[in-house]
Amino acid sequence: MRRELKILLAAAAILYGAGVWWGLPLHWGPDELNPDLIFDAIERHFAGGWHDKYPPVAYLLNAIVCLPAHMAAGHGWLSLTSPVTQSTLLILMRLVAVTMSVAAVSAIFLAGRELYGRRGALVAAIVGGFTPVFVFYAKLANVDAPSMCWLAWALYFYVRAVRGGHARDLVGYGLTAVTAIATKDQTGGFFVLPSLHLAWIAARHRAWRPLLVAGGVSLVVLVFEMGVPFNLAGFTAHVAMITGDASQPYRFPGSTLARQTLVAKMTFLQLAWTMTWPGLAAGLAGIALEVRRRRFLWLLWPALSYYVCFLVVAGYVYDRFLIGLGFVLALFAGGLVDVVLGAAAARWRVAAVASFSALVAWWGVSMDMMMILDSRDAATQWVLAHRMHGGIGLVGPSSYLPYIPAAVRLLGGPDGFDADRRPLYIVVNAEWMRRRPLPPLETAWQQFLDSGDSGYVVAARFKTLPPASFLSYSSVFRNGVEDPLTNLDKVGPEIVVYWRPAATR
């Protein structure tokens, strides 16, 4: 392994591993798999109708790290429900995501080296893997990082298959593509047009046999990864779930034309958020260069395929949906760098590329800062230092609030307490409390606390905005409301601690 790849992967491991403990012992990670979901799959042997909103592969991978604990619990050696066990297992599950994210970066590097050499490959890997959205999901037990790992390797094998046409690369492409699909269904959109492209190449060269072998093997693997032979009922239920009405509330409103116009607009804007504006600009400039040079424009097929076969059909866009598009554009950014540096680049050009790479990478570091310095941890320390006597009440879901030992989530409204028996402190996530519509219980508490007659005053506010983080200056983190298109602003929310002074007199 070359020195630059070793350094790159070490940096990625540090970047992704930092803050892997975020939110524990609570589950702050949005849409994150948790040990209980894995235990359910293990206990049902991934059969008997078992299914969830995601395909089985991520659950199978996480079952590997959870199975020893499940077996130990069967012998009475530990409790699966204890906070220590749950937190330990969730960290192990997150480390699976960290490992696969590092593997994704290595695949981007290798694909970039195939096309643009070592310098272009290094920049491609930084632009694709060191940006805030990927850094966020790289340290969580969601299915996003594993699916992007398989996608990145599929892109690598696709590059090699197009350029060399070797049977092993076709098989590699097929196996990684179907495994990506069996990890997160929507990644299937990436592979429609590239697969047709490979079929066209095979027809042109009259070399059908390697393609048919690769396709057949991949289809068999997909069938087993989806559990069809031993869990047909579960597979059918999963397909019914993802093709049903569950996603309808998320679709952009309006006519078909209005919806698709908004999909196109938000894809562009969310790509800038996902890749950073400098990263997106470099990717688009790299595409423009390839248009002039007429070399590797076929690399656009995965991106176009995903847009047409998934985003257009889904009718809505989240930032995490665009990580894979960022991988493709990152390769073109590597091509731009290859041209800028040339055979014997001037020092100012080398300095410019190094500065650009550092700038993009710092956005990833910024995400780490936001998570490590999460405002909920600061709120916990403040409350514990000022508690004195009296209870601590939490309003809202625990996954949005600080972990405060001995605090109690309030399940009744303010009218359910006598005036002198209300908690000394009430802690809320102000950004979550600004949701509209807000559940009735939280609405009652917010109106009570804002009324001026509650007897509570604001004792402290906490909000994560470290000056060294680029993200601190974005509207997503500063506007005080939750952004519907990203989960990143669930990090470091505004926490407000209300205090009842009369209780201390």
Image (cartoon, rainbow, N blue to C red):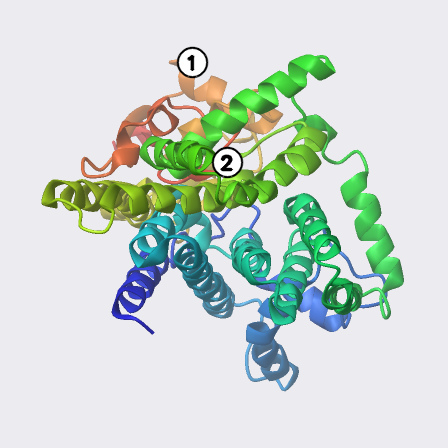
Q: Could you tell me how far apart the alpha carbons at marks 1 and 2 are, in whole angstroms?
A: 37 Å
Spot the residue most to the bottom. 75
Q: Residue at x 63, y 28 (%)?
A: 316
- In the image, taking residue 44 as reference, residue 394 lies left or right, namely left
- In the image, taking residue 389 as reference, residue 38 lies left or right, namely right
> Who is closer to the viewer here, 106 or 316?
106
Binning the other alpha carbons within 10 Å of mark 2 as few (below 14), some (14 to 19) or many (20 upward) gives many
> Who is closer to the viewer here, 65 or 269?
269
Name the residue type under label 1: Ser
Identify the mark at residue 319; answer none if there is no mark: 2
Q: Identify the secondary structure beneath mark 1.
A: loop
Q: Which residue matches tag 1?
A: 451
Residue 266 position within the rendered picture, expressed as x and y whole percent measured from the top left: 53, 24
- Numbered disc in front, either 1 or 2: 2
Residue 397 position within the rendered picture, expressed as x and y whole percent measured from the top left: 53, 40
Residue 207 vs 304, above or below: the answer is below
Q: Residue at x 44, y 66 (%)?
A: 99
Which quarter of the rendering shows the N terminus? Answer: bottom left
Identify the mark at residue 434; answer none if there is no mark: none
Q: Residue at x 46, y 59 (%)?
A: 104
Of label 1 and label 2, which has the lower sequence position? 2
Q: Is residue 442 visible?
A: yes
